[in-house]
Image (spheres, rainbow, N blue to C red):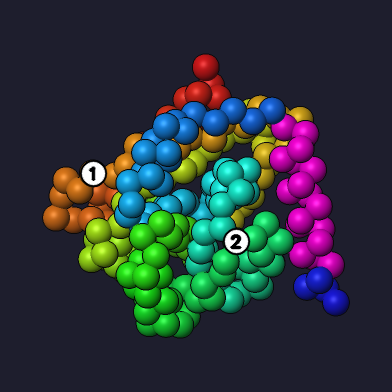
Amino acid sequence: MKFTLLKWIGFLALTLIYKTCKIEIKGQKYFDKTYQNGKPTLLCVWHGRMLFPIYYVKSKNLSPWAIASPYRDGAIIASILQKWKINIIWGSSNRNAKQVSKTMSSIFEEDKNAIVCITNDGPKGPRHIAKKGSLEIAKKFDADIITITGHSSKFWKFGSWDEFILPKPFSKIIILVAPQYVHNSNDIVKSVSSYMVDYEQKANDYIDE
């Protein structure tokens, strides 16, 4: 009963936020270029900024896969995503990791237009440090790696490990689609983490202009 209540409260709250905010998407051309090149995509997002790429995927009427933690908070988010026709891979780097890797590999191998979304520093951090497993799978199957992030002119910031940001209703939201990640280092964890942090800062800068 409590889970169902929280799920609906979350769904209605996000719907209110998305409907009342002025949302501007930057970098649309980068997503189009990646999505049309006949290769699968790993969409990387930071746990604390997940609401921005969620809106983007929802607004594009896509049906990607998302990795969701079986913990309560992850399950609530997953139930909301399912309402928006997002497919769920249950598990995380801390639980059922081998099955998650196997499922991701199958998706990338069988569907060249597949999109798999992952919160790279979830489910419990450390913040802004990408997990290696999903990145190595993307590299193995020659999947493109991209990040989508964003920021809001008015927001609540939670005191959680991920510094989770919840936009306030009637705010201005910037959603930033970054260019495809270019492999330029033997240390893929450090390189992708830096790439994602850089574009998160760019999203912040757009709001501060």
Tag 2 secondary structure: loop
Query: Which mark sits nearer the N-terminus, 1 or 2?
Result: 2
Q: Can residue 193 be seen in this view?
A: no
Outermost top residue = 209
Residue located 73% across and 48% down the image? 14
Q: Residue 86 carries which label?
A: 2
Q: Is residue 39 visible?
A: yes
Where 134 sits versus 102, above or below?
A: above
Q: Can residue 10 be found in the magenta stretch?
A: yes
Residue located 42% across and 32% down the image? 29
Q: Could you say where residue 46 lies in the image, as x and y percent from the top left? A: 47, 51
Q: Could you say where residue 180 lies in the image, as x and y percent from the top left? A: 32, 42
Q: Is the magenta stretch mostly helix, strand or loop?
A: helix
Residue located 72% across and 40% down the image? 18
Q: Give the range drawn in magenta.
A: 5-21
Name the amino acid type tagged 2: Ile
Category of crowding for the residue at label 1, using alpha-carbon neighbours closer than 10 angstroms: few (below 14), some (14–19), many (at least 20): few
Can you identify the residue that label 1 sits on? 182
Category of crowding for the residue at label 2, using alpha-carbon neighbours closer than 10 angstroms: few (below 14), some (14–19), many (at least 20): many
Closer-to-camera residue (38/142): 38
Q: How far apart are marks 1 and 2 (CA)?
A: 27 Å
Name the amino acid type tagged 1: Val
* CB under 8 Å between discs 1 and 2: no
In the picture, the quarter occupied by the N terminus is bottom right
**Relative to residue 7, is residue 124 drawn left or right?**
left
Residue located 55% across and 25% down the image? 207
Where 128 sits versus 152, above or below?
A: below
Tag 1 secondary structure: loop
